[in-house]
Amino acid sequence: MSKQTFQVVIPDYKYWRQNVKCQTGCPVNTDSRGYVRAIAEGDYEKAYWIARIPNPLASICGRICAAPCELACRRGWIDESISIRALKRFVTEKFGVEIYQDKKGFAKDFISRFKKEGVGVSGILNAAMDTGKPVSIAGAGPAGLACAHELALMGYKPVIYEMEKVAGGMCAVGIPSYRLPREILQAEIDAIKALGVEIHLGVQIGKDIPLKKLYDESAAVLLAVGAKKSRMLQMEGSNGKGVLGGVDFLGDVFTGKEVKIGPKVVVIGGGNVAYDVARTSVRQKGVGAVSLVCLEDPEHMLADKIEVEEGAEEGVEKLNSYGPHKIDLDENNVVKSVTFKKVISVFDSDGNFNPRFDESDTVTIPADTVFFSVGQAFDLSFLENCGLDIEKNQRGMIKAGPDKITTSLPGLFVAGDLAYGPKLVIDAVANGKKAAIAIHEYISGKHLKIRKSEVHLEHYGHDVLGNEVSHPKDYEKVPRSHVPVKPTEERKASIFTVVETGFTKESAEEQGGRCLNCAVNTIFDGDRCILCGGCSDVCPEYCLRLVSLENIRGDETLTRLYRNRYGNDPEGTGSAIIKDEDRCIRCGLCAKRCPVDAITMERFLFKEVFTSE
C-alpha cells in the first residue's frame, strides 16, 4: 500500500495576502473583510471609508456591482458567500457621497481620510508635474471617472469630454434606474468634480473637437469610450421593423427618449444586459409578454442568479438551450414571430464558441419586438482621418500594449471597454486607476514602484483577543439572507422604482457576522509543540493533520527549512502540522486547546502604496 503524500507551501507574504480572497478577488483590492467586520461590530463610518478609499464609485458598486469579491469569498465554499455588495450599500447610504449636500465637504473629508489611511496612489499625493496643459479624457464612464479621480488626487487638472448629455457612461444609459437610482450616480459624479475634475457634456470627439487637436493641446489623452452600441446578428428577417438592439433600447429609455415596443417582446441573449432589457421591457406601457431566449442551459447562463430570479418574479419567461434561426416578418416587413433551434452544444471539443443545433427541433414565439442582446460594439468613427498615426489590431480596434493601457502613440492611452472589451463596472474602475498611474509616469518621466509592508499581530482590536477570535455566537450556522425587495407589482409599475430595499441595521450586523475573518491565521511554533494532536482532534472542519516529514513535498524553501533544522534531508524523523487553509473557519479552537501555547491566532495586515522613491 503506497503512503499518502501531501504537497505543501511555506507561508510568505503572497500566501497570507491570498488568504484574504475577497480582497484579492476585488479588481481594486478593496478590503471587503475589513468593512464587513466593521459593520458586524457596529462601526459603520469606519466601514464606509474602508470601502470608499480604494473605490471612487463605492456607492454605485454597493448597488450594481457583480461582486467578484463574493465569488471569491471562502464562506461560499462552506455554504453561501457573505452579502458583501449589499453590506457596502448599507454603509454608503449612511456615510457615502449621497448624504453630503455640499460635495466639497465630502472632498475635504475624503482627502483627510485618504492621507491617513489611503492605499494605491497615496504615496504620490499631490505629485503632479506642471505642464501647463490639462490631461484630457474622452468618456465619462466608470473608467474615465476613476482615472480623473486619481489624477485629481495627484494634483493634475483632468478634463473629461462626454458625448452624451449626462455623465456616467453605461451606468447612466445602460444600467436600469430600478437598480441604480440616478441621484446616486450623480452624487458620485459631483463628488469627483469637487476634487477638481472638469466634465464637459454633449461634446463628441472627432465631431466637436478633432482628436488631433485634443492630443496636441493636452499633456496626455485617455480614450475611455465605452461599448455603447448593440451587436446585431445577421439572419433571415433581422432587418425587419421591430428588430432592435438591446443596448440601444436601454440608452433611449434612460436618456428620456420616447420608445414604443410590444406588446409581445422577445429578448435574444442570456447575460445581465439581456435581463436589463427584458426587465425594462416589462415596465413599458402596453407590454404584455416578455420572453428571454438564450443558448446556455440554466446552470451556465451568464446572468447573475438574482437577475434570473427577480426577472421570473416580474414575468420574464425564460427559454434555455435554444438559438435564433430566423425572424418571421409579415407582408409589411414587420416582425410577427421568431423561430429558434434546439442547442446540442455551445462549445466545441477545443472549448471554442461554436454552437451546434438540432435542425429538427424548433420552437416559434410570437413577437412584435425583438431585441438582440448578444454583445456590445464600439463607435470608433472619431479615429477616421484623425491625423494621428495610431496602430490598430486585426479587428480594427486600437492596439493596446501588454499593460492594456498604452498605445503606439506616446501620450495616448486607452482604458475600460476600449482596452479589453465589455467587462464589469469594477473592472473599468480598476483599469481607470491603472491608467492614471501610467499617465503620471509618462508626464513625470518617473517609474513608480509598489512599496509593500506587512505585520502579524497576535492582539488586534476586536479581531483577536489573546487566542480568542472575535465571532458572534454560532456564526458558522447563520445562513445568508436575501436582500429584501419591494413587492413585484409595485416595482413593475415604474423604471424608477428601486427593487432592493436594503438591509436593516440588525440584518446587516448579522450578515456581517457571518464573515470567517480570513485575515486571522493560525501560527504554529514548532519549538513548543509536543505532538499531542489535540489541535487536530478539536478542529471541527478537520483541516489540521500531524504527519511525518517523509509524507510532505514542497519547493526549495521547504528543503532549506529541513536542512536548517535537521542538518540534512529528513529520513524517517521529524513531524509537521499541515493545514488545509480552504477548510479553516478561524474558530480558534486549536489555539485554545493547545496545552503548551504552540498555536497563536494572529491578524495579518498589509499595505501597498505607489512610490517614486
Image: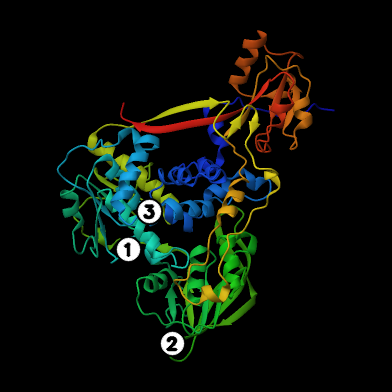
The answer to the question of whether label 1 and label 3 lie on touching residues, with beta carbons closer than 8 A, is no
Residue 266 on image: x %, y %:
53, 77
Among numbered discs 2 and 1, the one appearing first in the sequence: 2
Task: Name the amino acid, label 3.
Answer: Val
Q: Is residue 16 above or below residue 32?
A: above
Snapshot colouring: rainbow
- Is residue 5 visible in the rendered image? The answer is no
Q: Out of 559 and 193, give the one closest to the viewer.
A: 193
Q: Out of 234 and 131, give the one closest to the viewer.
A: 131
Quadrant the N terminus occupies = top right
- Residue located at (68% from left, 33% from top): 580
Residue 529 on image: x %, y %:
72, 17
Q: Out of 40 and 126, give the one closest to the viewer.
A: 40
The answer to the question of whether label 3 and label 2 lie on touching residues, with beta carbons closer than 8 A, is no
**Picture quarter containing residue 289?**
bottom right
Q: Is residue 442 above or below residue 398?
A: above
Task: Name the amino acid, label 1.
Answer: Asp
Circle 2: element type: loop
Q: Which residue is mark 1?
A: 379
Q: Out of 422 and 591, give the one closest to the viewer.
A: 591
- Is residue 434 visible in the rendered image? The answer is yes
Q: Which residue is mark 2?
A: 333
Of tags 1 and 3, the one toward the viewer is 3
Q: Is residue 603 left or right of residue 576?
A: left
Among numbered discs 3 and 2, the one appearing first in the sequence: 3
Q: Which residue is mark 3?
A: 97
User: What is the distance, in whole Å, between disc 2 and disc 1 at their CAs?
Assistant: 28 Å
Residue 355 on image: x %, y %:
58, 64
Quadrant the C terminus occupies = top left
Task: Name the amino acid, label 2.
Answer: Asn
